[in-house]
Image (cartoon, rainbow, N blue to C red):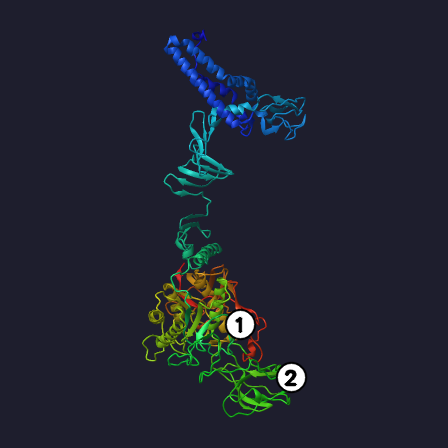
Amino acid sequence: MADADQYTPIPLRQLAPLVAALIVKESLSGLDVSGANVGDMSIVDYTKAVNEATSQALDAADRAYQTSESSSQSADAAANAADSAVATISGAAATLAQNTALASLVANNPAQFTNRGGWDAAKNSPALASGVGAEGDLYIVTVAGAATLDGVADWSLLDGAWYHNGAWQRLANAGYPTIAQVFQGLQGVIADGVTLNSQTGHALTLRDVVGYVLTAIDGAGNISTAGKQLLLGSTLLDCNAKGNFLFRQRDNMGNVAWGVREDGSPAFPQGAARADLGPISVTTNSGGAGVLIKDKNGFIVLDTSGTYGTSAVDFSAEEIAERDRMQLARSAAVMAGPGDLLRARPVWGISVSLATGQSEMMGYVSLPALSITQPHDNITFGQDPRGQVFGDSKDAWTPRGGDPSPMPLVAVNVSQTDFSTLKFPSALVYKPSTVDVTVPAVTSGNPKITLSTNDTSIDFTTGFSVGQVIQCAGFTGAAAKNNETGGLWYSNYVTLTSVAAQTITGTCDGVWWGWTPVAVTGATGVSIAPLRITRDFGEQQSIAALNFFRGLQLDQRQMVSDSTRRLALLSTCVSGMPLYNLSKGEDNNVYLRNLQSATIAKQQADKLGVSSGIFLIEFCQGGSETTTNYDTYGALLSAYFSDIKDDLMPIFGQDVDPFIEIVPISGMNMPSIGYNDIARAQVDYVKKTPGAYIATVGYPAIDYGFHYSSNGERYVAAMRAKVRHRIINQGMAWRPLIMEKATLRGKTILLDCHVPYSPMQVLPCWRGQSTVTFDDLGFGVYDGATGATLPIASAEIVGETQIEITLGSAPSAPVWVTYGDSSHQGSGNVFDSDPAVSRDVYQWWEGNGAPYSENISDLLNKPYSLQNPMINYALKSVEG
């Protein structure tokens, strides 16, 4: 370095980037040998070592240069230091010089290099063959070896195998440009001036040649870019939008799908049909010029076209579909919502359910009782949850049989006359070989019938007695008139007036009217059996409901039984009383039966040394409300439940309210007051009262006019238990199938319905022992001003939650819409699609006392289907 002063010194820190730029070209940006080794070091570690050595050498060269400038006496020392620095970097400089020709080749042939990855030259893996390849394919040797390709058999680490002009060529050290990228990038990769860097606080940063960030990806995967457009498939997100747009989305044809203007307002192309802006929906009206603006529930709040303001236009299919979609979502949200977790659960040693109300809950005329064995561990206090004396009694509640001890909960048949237990044979039927029918003359009253037989194996005196009701089956032809019949009322039965061994005579009776028998001689195939439809008491729905509920509860807890936590039933129901007479403070003291029975239950629990409480109040009442209107009944109902909770809870020492389970009045007991006033008041009480719920209604059950058959009682019981399990055991939300809104437009009414299990469907319902499907499905429409009945032209389900009613003409005022009113005998045909079935099965066997008209083969020995029926209710229409 004696002549060092003859040169213009350039610091190596400035020289290195200039040299590196010569060998780093865009065509090699795809090369990646980060997994390769140099000797026994990984390429990454090797790179770091060279970087460090180079940095030390450059520092030494800088110090040497500075020293030579500041002190001539240290010139020799500076020269020696510079020589040492040059020697240190000679390996790196040699590599750079060695690849200058290769860099020139790559720069001049950018399209002819296709990086195919690494190649093991020792094992020829992946397998390459002489003269076979694609123009421009480039493999970097990762393991040195002697595999022969087109005459080349000496391959060193990081050599390149390049297929060009039909043959494989060796490019010595072709992998080193990639290494140089790592060297020069210093924690990044440089490709033609663009830096890819992962050491900037982001997961990945892409910079331009000046160092400005082009794109960055942070640790959460968020992308920031300096560009104004982002192409996602064929969709272009454009922040360089024109026409006062801040942002817009364009399709692959460049058409704007939507955008945001400078003031923040959304903008849509002219062809857009609808815009949903939060809870507001703006829709182009397909029926004419103008737009519709709808609220969050899908109801129209503004119509600039005037189309929906005219009475001649029906609801469009599009509008019905949209309302259906939104109502279905609301129904799903209700059912998926949280249940009531603040009421009492059956957690005590003895948890009591108290049945209150009228004869619908008492098993009136529901003979014979079917739930005569206890399938689990449910109990009552005494022999019957109804107590010793009930019906229309004003007597105190006392345990049946006198013993208040806990006993298995079973149904018993009880005489209305003296409340004695009725003993029925399990099956009693006479089948004479032949039967003769004669018709005695009568001077007053119903016609009479005499049945006689020559079959001496028959002795009617062994099973029949005077005053007993019997029925016949098997007569044919004109004589079929002598068979018991169903229909709206059970009919064509015989009340015996005389009984002999082979001859019986009786009056031809029905519920409301008599019938005329038909004489016949030698009839065969005739059966004569008891008919247990006297005004006595039998099957109780509350018993079957508690049994089904208990089974579901035990299944949920994966237990067969639990003697430490039993369920008990009490019933204080009485017949034929309006709610006013059942309420607290009345002279007949019927209300006190609730307190008397609860006190006995508490005493028995204390005697057993177990805790006790009331978790449920059951209620079905309303058939005797012949004059009570909506407001009066609603106030009475609210006071009744408030009183009964306030009085019963202290008896058990509990401070958590029980649930209230209401079965609204329906069927033949539906009062004709107002617009379903009693049922409507019961439903509205539930809507505003936490812990109260509507389980079902009874009109789908097989009945005897005002009251249910034994199977009808158990059907209603299963419906109640299903819902009770959902609410109390599972802690889930519930709302029954019910009308929620009636929108009137012209002569068309569109009903929005809450549907627990969509879709809705039309099913026949039982009315007596036969089914009926109403043309109007059970709906009634009444003028809101005059109360006049408005003729219905059609009623149909038009969606999963929508029902459309078309009137004969457009009304001049809002209307009341009823479902299951007294003009339909409290019934209807709208059900949901709940797939649930009962555990009890439909039972009938000949001679058990049930009518022959209930021998229905489609139901026999099958579980009851438990689709939810629409609840009897009424709504006043809103203008739509």
- Residue 171 is situated, as x and y percent measured from the top left of the image, at 60, 21
Question: Tag 1: residue type?
Answer: Thr
> Mark 2: few, some, or many residues within 10 Å (few <14, many ≥20)?
some
- Residue 469 is situated, as x and y percent measured from the top left of the image, at 52, 85
For residue 377, above or below residue 529:
above
* Tag 2–tag 1 contact (CB < 8 Å): no
Query: Which residue is under mark 2?
Result: 524
Q: Which of 743 and 6 is in front in this view?
A: 6
Q: Nearer the viewer, residue 487 or 150?
A: 150
Q: Nearer the viewer, mark 2 or mark 1?
A: 2
Query: Which residue is under mark 1?
Result: 771
- Residue 576 is situated, as x and y percent measured from the top left of the image, at 40, 78
For residue 788, above or below residue 197:
below
For residue 11, above or below residue 366:
above
Q: Can residue 700 be seen in this view?
A: no
Left or right: 654 with respect to 428?
Answer: left
Q: Is mark 2 on a helix, strand or loop?
A: loop
Q: Nearer the viewer, residue 605 or 317?
A: 605
Left or right: 20 with respect to 151?
Answer: left
> Mark 1: few, some, or many residues within 10 Å (few <14, many ≥20)?
some
User: Label 2 to label 1, Cα distance in Å?
Assistant: 30 Å
Left or right: 809 with respect to 458?
Answer: left
Q: Is mark 1 on a helix, strand or loop?
A: strand
Of the residues under marks 2 and 1, which one precedes in the sequence? 2
- Residue 277 is situated, as x and y percent measured from the top left of the image, at 40, 48
On residue 380, the disc is: none
Q: Can residue 87 be seen in this view?
A: yes
Work out which quarter of the rendered image holds the C terminus and state it. Answer: bottom left
Quadrant of residue 326 in the image? bottom left
Question: Tag 2: residue type?
Answer: Thr
